[in-house]
Image (cartoon, rainbow, N blue to C red):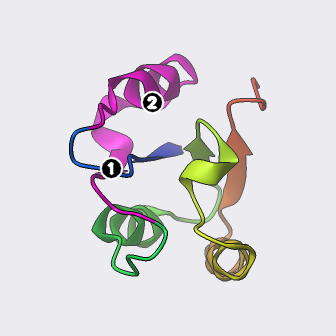
């Protein structure tokens, strides 16, 4: 199953384009988790936490662009470690399979 993760940096930004692209990539709208108004310095990301908690072995985590997922290289590593522990595969818009 595909799980989508989207993030916009400010509450005023629109997540519609990311949602539409995730749906076009085969992610069910109910399986898209969004973080609104969260910048790189904000550590709390409830949408990402929900995404990671919902992922299971064999699922694919899909993001529209890699910079929408981690806030830093260390954050990327921590997210990747969590995905590996759950058996979830990362995917981006470039992975059109």
Location of residue 75 in the rendering, given as x and y in whole percent from the top left corner: 63, 78
Q: Which mark is residue 76?
A: none
Q: In this view, does 72 lie above or below 93?
A: below
Does residue 67 appear in the picture of this structure? yes
User: Is residue 26 found inside the magenta-colored segment of the image?
Assistant: yes
Residue at 55 percent across and 50 percent down: it is: 68
The magenta stretch spans which residues? Answer: 13-39
Q: Is residue 75 above or below residue 13?
A: below
Q: Do the residues labelled 1 and 2 touch (CB within 8 Å)?
A: yes
Image quarter of residue 43: bottom left
Image quarter of residue 71: bottom right
User: Is residue 7 found inside the magenta-colored segment of the image?
Assistant: no
Residue at 74 percent across and 74 percent down: it is: 73
Q: Which mark is residue 18?
A: 2
Q: Is residue 13 above or below residue 81?
A: above
Does residue 60 appear in the picture of this structure? no
In this image, 46 relative to 79: left or right?
left
Measured Cα–Cα span from mark 1 to mark 2? 10 Å
Location of residue 16 in the rendering, given as x and y in whole percent from the top left corner: 33, 24
């Amino acid at each position: 199953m595909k799980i989508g993760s989207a993030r916009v940096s400010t509450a005023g930004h629109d997540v519609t384009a990311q949602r539409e692209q995730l749906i076009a990539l085969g992610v069910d709208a109910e399986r898209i988790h969004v973080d609104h108004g969260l910048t790189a310095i904000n550590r709390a990301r409830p949408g990402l936490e929900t995404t990671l908690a919902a992922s299971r072995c064999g699922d694919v985590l899909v993001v529209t662009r890699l910079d929408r997922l981690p806030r830093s290289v260390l954050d990327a590593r921590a997210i990747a470690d969590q995905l590996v522990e759950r058996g979830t595969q990362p995917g981006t818009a470039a992975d059109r399979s």
